[in-house]
Amino acid sequence: MHVSSSPGPDGFGPAFYRAFWPLLEDSVMAVLHAFHRGNADLARINQALVVLLPKKSDVTSADGFRPISLQKCVPKLAAKMLTTRLQGAIPTLISDLQTGFVKGRSITDNFLFASELLQCCRKRGAPTIALKLDFRKAFDSISWAALDRILDARGFGAPWRAWMSALLSSGRAAILLNGVPGPWIQCKRGLRQGDPLSPYLFIIVADLLHRMISDAAAPLPLRHPLVDDLDCPVIQYADDTLVLLRAEEPQVRRLKTVLDSFASATGLTINYSKSTFVPINVDAGAAAHLAGILGCAVASFSQTYLGLPLSDTKLPARVLDDLAIRVERCIPSWRVHLLNRGGRLTLTNAVMSLKPIHAMAAIRFPKSTVERMDKPRRGMFWKGAPRCSGGDCQVAWTMACRLKEEDGLGIIDISTQDTCLLLKTVHKLLTGDSNPWANWVRYWYTPECNPSPTASWAMFQGLLPTYHGIVGVTVGRGDSTSFWFDNWTSVGALATALPALLSHCTNSDITVRAALQDGMLNLPLQARLSAVTGAELQGLSTKLTGLQLGEAPDGRHLLWGDERSFRSGVVYKMLKRTGCTVRLADTNWDNFAPIRVKVFFWILRHGNTRTRSFLHRHGALGVEMCPFCPSSPEDIDHLFFSCPRLAAFWAFACPVAAPRMVPELAASLPLLEHRLRNTAVLLLLWIVWKNCNRKIFDNIEQDYKAMNKLIVDHAKLWTSRAPRRLDCAALELWCSSLPV
């Protein structure tokens, strides 16, 4: 359990038990041992407060709330122990089309599989029904007797079933309204939301629906819309269930019978009025008739499934507008007027930029969608508002989205991040990962059938050149390595190195294993070869002669850097890196200054600090002369270094040689460890900037001694962020030399 989890009715949460475990260990373990033996009296301690969380902002009825149980820790510990044991067995108990709560399975795989199947049905002209089921009070309505029978049928022994029965039947709950608990209610059915064991028990029950629909021994088995030999797809994520079946009346009636039988057996009732019935390649009259059998209303694509827009065709850009709206909705909920630019940068990157990350692994964002997401992010960072004008932006947004080491601010580039996560999906496919989408793609897109690609698969095909450019292959068996396009030789991809030979090959999708037979090159080529092609073939044959394939699977790794495994964060840096080196980037970011000061220095480095000269150049100020020495324009070098009012300050701060510009400042400081020196650079510039603003806006004059005292005070605060192993004595010695 997480240490910060909410406490139950007794007020003692996991943090309490962890802090006082030496005192509580014997008592808690005695209860757990009694529970294991089956003679624990759980009725006195198995209690929970039910907190009602609104599903939407404008809830007006009781069914608009989601009940969450806050349990006492001891029965929760017992449930957690059972959960830990159960987690290892769940993948073997549950269909691979159920991805909820199963370690190693991804919700994205289910969405991709559903999207690909629907688009295949549309392209093939197969009459299909997509039925998204809505369970009425799913967790709260499961019958305990049905659960026990299902566990028995799935091979759970009597002790397991007794433990689960004890946890369920002894439970009592009280509704917490306005902080006041109501009377205790004895639980009779359902699973507690908030109990660690409940999700796994639920998916075991929900898996029964998949088994009933896939029952091949039934009088009229439900079939796959496209392939006779495959079962009807039942795609599940917890209680989010999507069924694809043939648009035939016997099939629909059979499904209705199965659903009703499942509901009566388990208590999981189907709410047909809220379920979604979408026909594909079915005329309106037939669709209405089939929907009437189920008691559903006829709908159309696109539909929201697993939080993403699902369609049987390519998604139009307008459908993705909701993703951009989610990004923009973050801003009104924050008190942005209390945040400095450093805080706004943190929220922009850590929250707003990650709002659409769930969709990035499955959907290629068009340029218009990326621009709509960038507008509120840009407005949040520069102005603290949903929108900003060009005058509010001191540095170009494209520059802000560069890597920090390449003169950027490190703001996430949504388009590049989208590409990276999609490339990771491609990597899972090419490395033999077993998931519903990958298995379907390998089954459907074979060289023998060569079907026309759907919009979803065409999107991933378009990413293959980028993938091949950043990933190398260590050949084992060679059966999953593209002979032409994978980077498996010392000269790189053969398609790039030998373009003439590729143009004469009749099968560009050939694998390394198929091209190398008994150590000899055996390519399917046209009958007549040009002289250039013949020379390329001869050279390649000589190079590959004697190459023996092994029995190990092919391995894939990133081509650059120390990171060999495919991680989207590493790939992001690879795609964003331009190779240019930037002066002062290390000074900007490798220090102990607060984030707001780092942002200030970054803007300063780009020459866009709002000095009088800058404002005059942009028409915002009539004069550009320094208010303290009217003979000189107030540009960055003058404001921070050459203004006469700072002469005494710089004489003490940099006694060796007073700096004249930012690059000279680090060299003018005493010999310090590089992070301390970088911190001192930002500290000096920050104090000068604040001193100037106090004089202009507050008419407060500070001499060099007052500024030196601020340096000493700030240095103590900033170096407290340094790791303990770093000796900050040199910086403290430098600060102590300043007269205050």
Image (cartoon, rainbow, N blue to C red):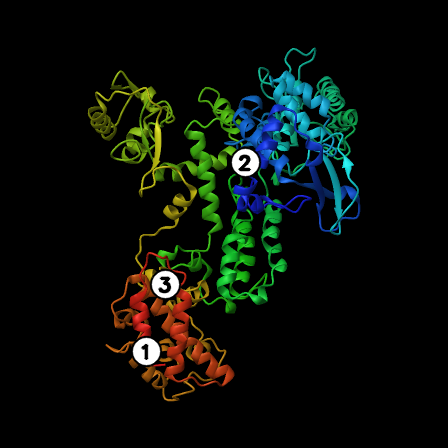
Packing grade of label 3 (10 A; few <14, some 14-19, many >=20) is many
Query: Can you give x and y, in whole percent of width and height, for residue 195 in the image?
Result: 64, 36
**Tag 2 or tag 3, which sits nearer the N-term?**
2
Say what amino acid the circle numbered 2 marks.
Thr
**Dividing the picture into quarters, in which one does residue 45 lie?**
top right
Quarter in which the N terminus is drawn: top right
Looking at the rendered structure, the secondary structure element under dot 3 is helix
Residue hosting label 2: 108
> Could you tell me if residue 200 is visible in this image?
yes
Query: Picture coordinates of residue 498 (x, y %)?
Result: 27, 32
Distance of mark 1 from mark 3, alpha carbons?
A: 24 Å
> Which of marks 3 and 1 precedes in the sequence?
3
Mark drawn on residue 672: none
Instruction: Return the mark for residue 588.
Output: 3
Which class describes the residues within 10 Å of circle 2: few (<14), some (14-19), or many (20+)? many
Query: Distance from label 2 to label 1 (Cα)?
Result: 59 Å
- Give the amino acid at mark 3: Asn
Q: From what the image shows, is residue 517 above or below residue 534? A: above
Judge whether 153 appears above or below 418 on screen.
Answer: above
From mark 3 to mark 2, how far is it between C-alphas? 38 Å
Answer left or right for 304 relative to 176: left
Residue at left 39%, top 85%?
703
Q: Is residue 295 above or below residue 349?
A: above
For the C terminus, the image quarter is bottom left
Seen from the viewer's position, the closer of residues 446 and 538 is 446
- Pointer 2 or 1: first along the chain: 2
Choose mark 2 or mark 1, whichever is in front.
1
Compare residues 11 and 58 and report the one nearer the observer.
11
Of residues 361 and 660, the one drawn nearer to the viewer in this rendering: 660
For mark 1, what is the residue? Answer: 738
Q: Kindly identify the residue that appears in the image at 53 percent across and 55 percent down.
A: 374
